[in-house]
Amino acid sequence: MEIQIKLFATLKDKAGSNKISVTVAEPATVATLLEAVGAAYPALQTSLPIALVSVNKAFAGRDTAVSPQDEVAMFPPVSGGSGADDLPHPTYFAVTTEPLDIDAIHAQLTSPEIGAVVSFTGFVRGQTQRDGLPPETSYLEYEAYSEMAELKMAQVAREIWQKWPLVKGVAIVQRIGRLDIGENTTFVACASGHRDQGVFDAARYGIDRLKEIVPVWKKEVGEDQSVWVEGDYRPTEADN
């Protein structure tokens, strides 16, 4: 049977395409799929040991079954669940190319019971000073598996409410595309009745968890070099 696979970031660059297909025998698992990819696409072989696989927008293990009807994706560890229809509190999740309107996002979370909103905003910096990356950044390019990203943002919100039940609203926004020095890239906000109800810790958790499980990648572009940034955290099925 033939399996279609979406590719992102470094895997897309190495394959020269954002989608590949392989033929595998039935029944197939992620493990047999990876073997088939390595055989059919030698350029991807060095990336396969650390590649992550999702099946129907959920992180998959090596024993996860795959079929032609599944939406399968492969990607490196993130740089840096279920849908949002049944979330119990106000939320705002977005993967967007547009500049952030922070006042408008705050308005999505506020109500008469909200007295505090704590937020984190990430920006493009011009000097990275990390091994393997350009010493000076000209701009960043962000890419996302957008459909899965918003589902994982909803999962982050659920995790926040489990840890900090007095937090009432959560907003998570990731910009994609080309972003120049000084532009904002990422925004996480948490709302509650008072500032001492966990919103500071919740906002910190939100940005840290976003960089672990939300499928977004960035490319550092310098004058003479461009490099996809890959994270160290490897999500598993336990992160669904």
Image (spheres, rainbow, N blue to C red):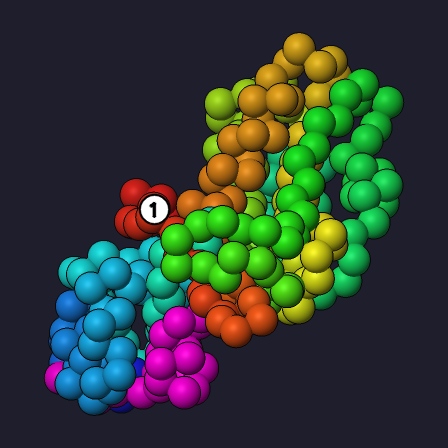
Q: Is residue 85 visible?
A: no
- Which residue is at the front of the view, 8 or 3? 8
Question: Which image quadrant for residue 5?
Answer: bottom left
| SS state under label 1 | loop
- Which residue is at the front of the view, 187 or 153? 187
| Residue at 64%, 22% in the rendered image | 199
Magenta segment, which residues?
A: 4-25
In the displayed structure image, the side of residue 106 where residue 40 appears, left or right:
left
Q: Is residue 75 visible?
A: yes
The picture places residue 37, in percent across and down from the top left corner, at 22, 81
| Residue at 60%, 30% in the rendered image | 203
| Disc 1: which residue | 233
Q: Quadrant of the N terminus?
A: bottom left
The picture places residue 173, in percent across and down from the top left corner, at 66, 50
Is 174 drawn above or below residue 143 in the view shown?
Answer: above
Amino acid on which the number 1 mark rests in the picture: Tyr
Question: Which image quadrant for residue 90?
Answer: top right
Q: Is residue 126 magenta?
A: no
| Residue at 15%, 85% in the rendered image | 39
Question: Which image quadrant for residue 122?
Answer: top right
